[in-house]
Image: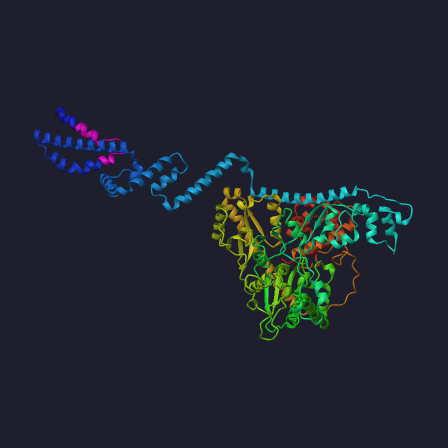
Amino acid sequence: MSDANLAALANLAAAKMPAVGKATFWKSLVDATVPEAIGKQAANVSDDEAWRALVASVRSCARAAESVLDAEQAFVSATGLDEQIWFGHGRPALAGVASRARLAAANAGLLPQWLDFDRFRRSSEQGIERELVHAAAAGNLSTEQLEVSLDFLVFDTLARKAFADSPILHSISGKSLDTLREEYRSLDAQVMEFRRAAIAAKLVQRRPPEGRQSGLKSQITEMALLRAEMAKQRRHIPIRQLVARAGQALQSLKPCFMMGPLSVAQYIAPGSLKFDLVIMDEASQMRPEDAIGALARGGQAIIVGDPKQLPPTSFFDRIAERVGEDEDDDEITLAEDSKSILELASSIFDQRMLRWHYRSRHVALIAFSNRQFYKDELIVFPSPAGQADRFGIGWSFIADGITTKGVNPVEARAVAAAAAKFLIEQQSRSLGVVAMNIKQAQRIADELAAMADRDPVLAKALAEAENEASGEPFFIKNLENVQGDERDVIMISVTYGPASSGGRPPQNFGPVNQETGWRRLNVLFTRAKERMEIFSSMRSSDILPKEGTDRGPRSLKLFLEYAGTGSLGVEPVRSGRDPDSDFEDAVLEGLRELNFDCVPQVGVANFFLDIGVRDPSSPGEFIAAIECDGAAYHSEKSARDRDRLRQEILENLGWNIIRIWSTDWFRNPDGELDRVCRELKGLISEREETRVRRVQRSAVSEQPAAPVAKEPSAPPLRQGTLFGDQVTGRSAATKRPSGGISVEQARAKLIDLRERTIKERFPDADPASGLLRKSMLDELLKKRPTDMDEFRNMVRLDLRQNTDAAQVKEFSERVFDIVAEIDA
């Protein structure tokens, strides 16, 4: 064989064995152009001429292959082609190469986009997104998932970097954070107790001046005079004279004076006493000329009031002067309301709005005033309960009510009947009744008294409700003198109605018609803590306020519409707000996958809980709130607001708070979901058990009582005793009172026990270790132990260890009795 033939075969061999990765291409080339023709030609080689022809064919194939490879290499060098990206799954056969090239040529207009993609791909080679780009280019990740995948990648990288930069995060868990928060809450409460004790200790060190102890009786002063007066049985000197002669001693003994402005002028002569601070409450009702005397006796002043509530008024003075018993309310001309010290001070000094609203235990009770009068600026905490019979607003239309000379007898009877039913059936809750004028209030009182005369059960319930010792006694008042009062339930007699059956009500609504009538209504609509019951003989459509004026009648019209229809839509349901963070969104999605009915951002007025979980047996109520340490948590300016007050308020409203910490969620989201799921199921089971107990109690109470032998009457209770048992021990079988009072009522009872009985029994005890100090009181109302075993298991060890053992031994049973009364 000649050298030329050998060279041709060598070229063919070299072309047939290209670099790794190109064999498929060469094989396809050979398969396409060589085997069939050359194979036949090789099979027919019989002489040198045939062999030379075969060699020529092989050389031609080799040159073709080399030219293709050279062209490809030039193209790759010129374009920087990445075969993996261009072909997608490695180099295809020659037909695939040609097909890919033809596809690109047919879509030449997409070249700029391809170049943009290629530039981005190259720039991402050193970034965290490299694997995402490769996965998308390979078709393993859809373009729709790229954005969320990148978000996950970025946040995951940042979280890992945060843990790497701050190794302490590895040692922080939700349990440790919860422990720190509980310790802070306890210490914060103790600081308040210690601060009070420190102030008291400092005041005790101030010895009151003895004053002049000899001479004429009229010349004796200070402590000598006080001792002389305390020794007297009668003929005491006037208070003004006592303050003038013994003022310094009085201030040393009692540094805080609580007086009305007229009492200040009456009892404290100018220049006789000076106070460091004067605090004026309900300042919207105080005229400047009445307030100036008190201000002149102080070094500093804090003036507190609501400019949207009652102004100073001489309403009653004018009524007393001008209106007889039979005169119609339509003829009353009110004295013009004057400016208050609050308005005067607001125009001169800095002011600060107290935005947190505590009173209403349901948002429906404050929603109207917040919208109409406060421009939705109040921070209102949502309620876990729906607007059922216990909470919210009730509406009763009195179709046959007629108002004559300011009195609506039919409506008065309806209100009195409702009040009587309430006083008998709901003795654990406080009640107030408000009418629009004095005459209607008196008529309601007369109707209720007549019912009590006929019903001894009602008479007893009424007497107990009116007892001042109850803390919030039952009252019947009119619109002008209800400011400052609050009750669990307020019944409102709108009073005004048609003068005759089927007629239209006159458009004279007494003080509501005045320029500041809307402020009176604002007071009226914000007295209830749990529920308002509205009794009205007219509908909102019966009120026709003048265009552009009459804010009072217009507000009354809107309120009647709200009470009748609930048109503000204030139920604590979906607020329309999205979750504040992806963290909350992930928690929400996880809980929904576990079949919990969850609502993001529960709330209505400047305050929103991260996630609310509905009660499966009562979808209108929430079983718990899930709080995440997201933006809302970290944006709080005060640790006290964030870690104590906020949660205390929510728990007092009945919320169960479950907290998820981001560190725990990042490390083990499935474990956190499992923990929250267990807690939610436990709360649901507890609520179901409570419902069963209520049904059982109701069934027992409906059965006729069995006759019992009359026992000797118990000895009278000493003052301050809340229950009859005076012994410190109690049999485990003794039945405790169960259900009936609210948490706030229990708090009031416990405070009464502390102030009236425990302090009397242990006068020298350290307040910071008292059984009912604030930190322990909050813990008892939160955990609600009903016996000593539960007390040991539920109450934190540090609180128990720092509590006076003697007080626990003597008064714990009474405390448990009160706690057991709380309506679960």
Q: Classify the position of the C terminus by image quarter.
A: bottom right
Q: Splitting the image into 4 quarters, where does residue 432 fall?
A: bottom right
Q: Which residue is drawn at 76% across and 52% down?
A: 264
Q: How many marks?
A: 0
Residue 120 visible in the picture: yes
Image spot of residue 453 (x, y percent): 73, 72
The residue closer to the viewer here, 680 or 343, is 343
Highlighted magenta segment, given as a residue range: 9-26
Residue ranking furthest to the bottom? 501
Q: Which residue is drawn at 37% across and 35% down?
A: 123
Image spot of residue 724 (x, y percent): 76, 59
The residue closer to the viewer here, 572 or 131, is 572
Q: Splitting the image into 4 quarters, where does residue 126 fall?
A: top left
Q: Splitting the image into 4 quarters, where does residue 111 fall?
A: top left
Say whether residue 25 is magenta: yes
Left-right relation of 61 to 370: left
Residue ranking furthest to the top? 3
The residue closer to the viewer here, 536 or 633, is 536
Image spot of residue 137 (x, y percent): 34, 41
Say whether residue 105 is magenta: no
Residue ranking furthest to the right? 215
Q: Residue at x 54, y 54 (%)?
A: 604
Q: Classify the position of the N terminus by image quarter.
A: top left
Residue 88 visible in the picture: no
Left-right relation of 46 to 106: left
Q: In this view, does 440 lie above or below 572?
A: below
Q: Main secondary structure of the magenta part?
A: helix
Image spot of residue 369 (x, y percent): 59, 58
